[in-house]
Image: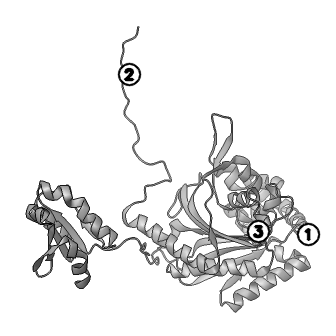
């Protein structure tokens, strides 16, 4: 029989994983404040909330986003469960939303359906300022209509969120990459163009030429960027219906006074996009005053069928990178509605008072009077010092005598005047001093 005791080994690394971090204090409230503002805007435009799981079946992404993209080739986090299922941490929200649309038979609801969602996504990307491996996105999507006004609506709603968060000098880089009627002709022309420059293309883009030539337009390689400057543009190859659709989207933007720039190389980093694609640029968004991409999106009319729908589901979406918003110098640091500056600092002294303290605090909570306390403290001086440091206007002092008489002392912290008030009259008294 082995009686040797197993010893616990110390954890070698007590830091959060690379590219991930703890969000707390003011930063936490900055995120929450942004979400509340974005949610408010969406509700007034007619969007409704949805939340999809952080984990999805891996093929939702490999089928939807597509091979040959950075996300699938290099960035997706995958795992195999004990039961043998292949799951993935969601790298984005659109494919899970379409999965939910199909799974719950939403095509039988009045169309279109409009959703907003907020939460974390995960990509094994190179961490940098404003970009993390666990990051937060706010998305708004319209499913079930191919009308150009839906593109305009989702863009307008997204832009309204950004502007109310403090963004200024916004403009849109926009393009149309066509549909299945006209895109093949464009891809053929694009492929022939890249073949002429094959020797100059980096290895990663030569590989993309075999699997997904459109991805080369999204390349981060400097040499490829030079080649892309003279690449054929998708707009020249649009069929009449795509040309009409794109023209209408631009007319809506002009009518709403939204600045845009047609970017012929814009394709976005995901394979499911069709027709309209766009990115939102904040011209002075970075700390050094350079332009910053803070949102993007587009139309994804064929994703539904790729994921198993019997017919195509026309859809368009707008995605906001929240991490970049809350760290931007222009962010308004929107305060969550639930956060109120304390009006009362509750001070308790003695065993009898401590015993009844939670009941007094409950009176204040039910009356929605914001307060602060340090119930673990026993000394009057230390509790008053905290109240002064927090700049709370009034202190409630609840000692042994007050506990026996069911009363409290209300002290004005600015002039040190104070009154003794019965607990039954406390709320009435506090209303008068508001």
Q: Position of residue 315 (x, y in %)?
A: 76, 69
Q: Residue at x 36, y 63 (%)?
A: 25
The one nearer the camera, 250 or 203, is: 250
Q: Residues within 10 Å of mark 1 (few under 14, many from 20)?
A: few
Residue at the image point whose x is 19% and y is 69% from the top: 387
x and y percent of residue 168 in the render? 53, 83
Which of the marked residues, 3 or 2, is nearer the chain's N terminus?
2
Name the element at disc 1. Answer: loop
- Residue 66: tell me if it is visible: no
Q: Nearer the viewer, mark 1 or mark 2?
A: 2
What SS does tag 2 mark? loop
Residue 280 visible to an observer of this rendering: yes
Where does label 2 land, which residue? 6
Q: Which residue is mark 3?
A: 109
Classed neighbour count for the residue bearing mark 2: other residues with Cα under 10 Å, few (<14), some (14–19), many (≥20): few
Earlier sequence position, callout 3 versus callout 1:
3
Instruction: Report whether 242 appears left or right of 33.
Output: right
Give the answer, above or below, for where 17 lies relative to 242. Answer: above
The circle on residue 181 is 1
Which quadrant holds the C terminus?
bottom left
Residue 282: quarter of image: bottom right
Q: Is residue 206 or residue 404 the one in the foreground? A: 404
Give the quadrant of residue 307.
bottom right
Q: CA distance from mark 1 to mark 2?
A: 67 Å
- The residue tagged with tag 3: helix, strand or loop? loop
Image quadrant assignment for residue 359: bottom left
Give the residue displayed 57% in from the left and 78% down from the top: 41
Q: State the image coordinates of residue 19 (x, y, percent, origin top left).
A: 50, 53
Using the image, tell me which numbered label, if any, was put on residue 382. Answer: none
1 and 2 marks in contact (CB < 8 Å): no
The mark lying in front, picked from 3 and 2, is 3
Q: Rounded to the nearest whole Å, what is the CA distance between mark 3 and mark 1? A: 28 Å
């Amino acid at each position: 029989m082995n009686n040797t005791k197993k010893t616990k080994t110390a954890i070698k690394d007590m830091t959060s994983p690379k590219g991930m971090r703890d969000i707390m204090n003011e930063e936490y409230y900055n995120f929450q404040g942004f979400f509340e503002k974005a949610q408010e805007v969406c509700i007034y435009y007619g969007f409704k909330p949805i939340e999809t799981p952080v984990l999805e079946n891996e093929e939702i992404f490999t089928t939807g986003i597509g091979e040959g993209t950075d996300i699938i080739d290099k960035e997706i986090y995958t795992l195999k469960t004990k039961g043998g299922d292949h799951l993935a941490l969601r790298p984005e929200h659109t494919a899970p939303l379409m999965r939910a649309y199909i799974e719950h038979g939403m095509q039988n609801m009045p169309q279109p359906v409009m959703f907003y969602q907020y939460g974390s996504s995960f990509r094994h990307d190179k961490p940098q300022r404003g970009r993390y491996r666990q990051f937060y996105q706010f998305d708004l999507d319209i499913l079930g209509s191919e009308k150009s006004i839906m593109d305009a609506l989702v863009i307008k709603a997204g832009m309204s969120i950004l502007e109310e968060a403090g963004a200024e000098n916004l403009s849109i880089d926009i393009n149309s990459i066509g549909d299945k009627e006209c895109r093949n002709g464009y891809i053929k022309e694009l492929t022939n163009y890249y073949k002429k420059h094959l020797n100059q293309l980096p290895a990663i883009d030569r590989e993309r030429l075999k699997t997904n030539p459109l991805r080369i337009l999204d390349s981060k390689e400097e040499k490829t960027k030079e080649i892309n400057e003279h690449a054929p543009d998708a707009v020249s190859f649009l069929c009449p219906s795509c040309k009409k659709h794109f023209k209408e989207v631009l007319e809506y933007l002009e009518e709403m006074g939204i600045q845009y720039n047609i970017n012929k190389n814009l394709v976005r980093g995901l394979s499911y996009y069709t027709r309209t694609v766009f990115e939102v640029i904040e011209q002075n968004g970075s700390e050094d005053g350079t332009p910053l991409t803070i949102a993007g999106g587009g139309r994804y009319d064929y994703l539904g069928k790729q994921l198993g729908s019997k017919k195509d589901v026309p859809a368009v979406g707008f995605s906001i990178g929240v991490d970049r918003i809350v760290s931007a110098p222009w962010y308004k640091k929107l305060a969550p509605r639930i956060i109120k500056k304390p009006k009362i600092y509750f001070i308790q002294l003695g065993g009898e008072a401590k015993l009844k303290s939670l009941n007094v605090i409950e009176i204040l909570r039910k009356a929605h009077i914001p307060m602060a306390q340090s119930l673990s403290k026993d000394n009057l001086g230390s509790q008053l010092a905290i109240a002064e440091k927090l700049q709370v206007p009034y202190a409630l002092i609840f000692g042994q005598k007050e506990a026996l008489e069911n009363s409290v002392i209300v002290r004005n912290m600015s002039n040190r005047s104070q009154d003794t008030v019965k607990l039954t009259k406390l709320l009435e008294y506090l209303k008068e001093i508001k």
